[in-house]
Amino acid sequence: PAEYVAASTTYQSAGDSTGLASYGYQWWVTNAYGLNTYFALGFGSQYIYVAPDRDLVVVVVKGFEDPPELVTASRPLIENYVLAASAP
């Protein structure tokens, strides 16, 4: 239902240090450049990052390393370059 999708992509808890963001229901939720955004975070810094107000979805698929990079490695690239470049 639409209500569940809306609730799942908004603040539900403070989250933890894994995603360095608040948590919805299976989505990390944050605010970047004044936009409400949310993301799924996978092993080795793989991301599905969504910025609905910009009609933007960014997917990062990375190779696996042993041990994997910090899980936050892709997020600064998404927020500081891709999201910033998508400004109207």
Image (cartoon, rainbow, N blue to C red):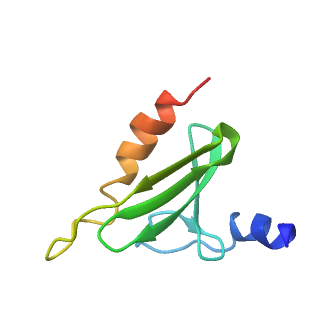
Identify which residue is drawn at 54% across, 73% down.
Answer: 15
* Image quarter hosting the C terminus: top right
Identify which residue is drawn at 56% across, 37% down.
Answer: 33
* Image quarter hosting the N terminus: bottom right
Which residue lies most toward the left here?
A: 66
Q: Position of residue 49 (x, y in %)?
A: 52, 55
Whether 77 is drawn above or below 67: the answer is above
Q: Nearer the viewer, residue 58 or 21?
A: 58
In the rendered view, does 84 fall on the left or right side of 12? Answer: left
Whether 75 is drawn above or below 11: the answer is above
Q: Position of residue 42 (x, y in %)?
A: 40, 72
In the rendered view, does 36 fall on the left or right side of 66? Answer: right
- Quadrant of the rendered structure where residue 65 is? bottom left
Q: Position of residue 59 (x, y in %)?
A: 45, 55
How many numbered dots are placed on residues in this image? 0
Q: Nearer the viewer, residue 5 or 23?
A: 5
Identify which residue is drawn at 51% across, 63% down.
Answer: 21
Q: Nearer the viewer, residue 1 or 11?
A: 1
Whether 55 is drawn above or below 18: the answer is above
Identify which residue is drawn at 30% across, 56% down.
Answer: 73
